[in-house]
Amino acid sequence: MIASLCLVGCMLLGQAGTAAEDELQMEVRRLVRQLNATQLAERESAEETLLTLGPKVLDLLPPVSDRTPAEVKQRLGRVRQKLQRETAESAARASLVSLGGDPQPLSKILASLEEQSGNKIVDFREQFGQPAPDPELRVSCDKEPFWEALDRVLDQAKLTVYPYGEETAINLVARGEDTLTRGGGAHYGGPFRFEPLRIVARREFREPDGQSLQLTLFVEWEPRLKPISLKQKMADVKAIDENGDALAVDDPEAELEVPSVGATSVELILPLKLPPRDVKQIASLKGKLAAMVPGKIETFTFSDLTTAKNVEQRIAGVIVTLEQARKNGAVWEVRVRVRFDEAGEALQSHRGWIFNNEAYLQGADGKPIPYDSLETTLQTPNEVGVAYLFVLEEPPEKHQFVYKTPGVIVATEFDYEIRDLKLP
């Protein structure tokens, strides 16, 4: 009887969800039509209402084409860009999670945290040949930041994070007997977690200037974030000792950049000047970590490849241009340009993230055909050109070219503070 009631309840919930989604889709269609209304007030009202509905309508907005009225194209572009930016800014905040506090198996708690946050969590113990018990834990939290909740779970389960496992996931292993708990010395800033890892003092007796103090921080972030770059300006690092006196950084003009693409953690080494011997600890060290965060991935689809020339598509804050598809020896070359309205430093030549963007041909059967290689044709602060090379038996007359990239890139900063670090 209970199972039957549960089944009926799930069916009703599913139907209610579908009805709400259908209603939202109909409302978006009505508002998009209203973007081309005769009266300016109606057009303004429709644009404002779409923005009020929030990022959930991004996937419901229609693509623009040559037949889209100019007014609708312009307003849809503004709506997409603002909602994309809102999505990226939201991603830069900590995920909030809740746990009821009732005894639950560890696996169920981790699954709940993964579902609520969108962060993939992998039990890596078996790969290390470690026992993998599934104890019942009691953890209670209500809309608590993800890292703080996860650390409490891991401390109860005597687990820690292994930073070299599966990419874009949090990999869990058993904690060593002498390893400290995770919740004790960590600082949380938005979707980031900062933990002091080591501090090294060096004195050169023959060279008075050859003295240094290096503090290494272990920096983790929620895997869903996928930052394009992380940078620490040493001018933003402020440290004081136990007496309240300032500790100098080694080079205030330095900017430290650490690789972040394809990772979920890094070691950030902060070089400071070695203080006098009577200084026993760093009472407080504050910093600002600058991150470039991508927005929602948008899909650009191009047809008529063998005749298309310089076909431009804009979604949100990015323009993708199909320059042409041409035969080049034994391969077909599809040349595209990608330009962001505000790229910041995201397209600097040493950053290769954009060359990992998904790009492929798609035949009539809908199956993707991956490219065999690529070549860079252009690189400026806001634009990148790429030639994708495909080995095809026939011309791609009936194929489409599909390209995916973030709709915006948002620069943001995350504050952190590390306290009470004893000096060696």
Image (spheres, rainbow, N blue to C red):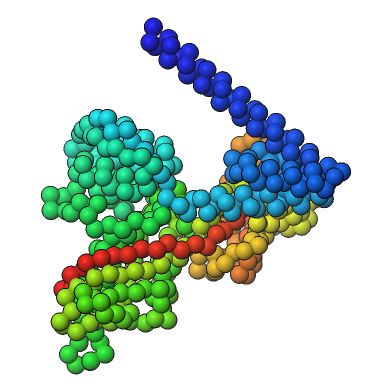
Tell me if residue 67 can be seen.
no
Q: Residue at x 21, y 41 (%)?
A: 156
Q: In the current view of this chain or complex, which residue is farthest to the left?
A: 177
Residue that protrudes farthest toward the right in the picture: 38
The residue located at (23%, 72%) in the rendering is 282
Seen from the viewer's position, the closer of residues 377 and 5 is 5
Q: In which quarter of the image is residue 324?
A: bottom right
Question: Looking at the picture, how far across and down is residue 196, in whole percent?
Answer: 26, 63
Q: Can residue 310 be seen in this view?
A: yes
Q: Where is residue 372 in the image (x, y as percent from the top left)?
A: 57, 51
Q: Residue at x 63, y 44 (%)?
A: 52
Q: In which quarter of the image is the N terminus?
A: top left
- Rendering quarter of residue 120: top left
- Report which quarter residue 152 is drawn in: top left
Q: How many marks?
A: 0
Instruction: Name the spot of residue 90 as percent of width and height, x first.
Output: 51, 50
Task: Please determine whether, in this image, residue 105 is positioned above or below residue 86.
Answer: above
Q: Would residue 153 appear left or right of 8 to someone viewing this image?
A: left
Which residue is drawn at the image coordinates 71% and 51% (left, top)? Answer: 77
Residue 424 image position (x, y, % from top left): 16, 73
387 to the left or right of 236? right
Q: Which residue lies furthest to the top in this view?
A: 1
